Amino acid sequence: MAKKNNTIKITLIKSLIGSTQKQRSIAKSLGLTKKDQTVEHENSKTIMGMVNAIPHLLKVTE
């Protein structure tokens, strides 16, 4: 299976306990619900805007 060049892997590195409701909803919209869970998304302005809203909770790799 060929891998696209414009995909990024997003990992939730911290728990959502103690975070605000807005931060939880952003993580949920990215598809992240549990600590150490990883999802792949296309590298777009929308996704990067969500990542930049909660950078202290995420790790992003290309």
Image: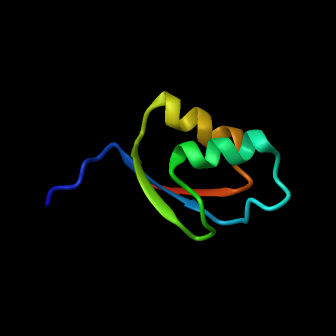
Rendered position, 31 above or below 29: below
11 on left or right of 43 = right
Rendered position, 17 above or below 51: below
Rendered position, 15 above or below 42: below
- Please tell me which residue is depicted at 63% across the width and 69% down the height of the picture: 35
Q: Quadrant of residue 60?
A: bottom right
- Please tell me which residue is depicted at 85% across the width and 58% down the height of the picture: 18
43 on left or right of 50 = left
44 on left or right of 55 = left
Q: Position of residue 54 (x, y in %)?
A: 71, 45
Rendered position, 31 above or below 50: below
Q: Position of residue 56 (x, y in %)?
A: 74, 54
Q: Position of residue 25 (x, y in %)?
A: 66, 42
In this view, the residue farthest toward the bottom is 36
Q: How many marks?
A: 0
- Please tell me which residue is depicted at 78% across the width and 43% down the height of the picture: 21
Q: Quadrant of residue 11?
A: bottom right
Which quarter shows the C terminus?
Answer: bottom left
Q: Quadrant of residue 12?
A: bottom right
Which quarter shows the N terminus?
Answer: bottom left
Q: Position of residue 3 (x, y in %)?
A: 22, 55
In this view, the residue farthest toward the top is 45
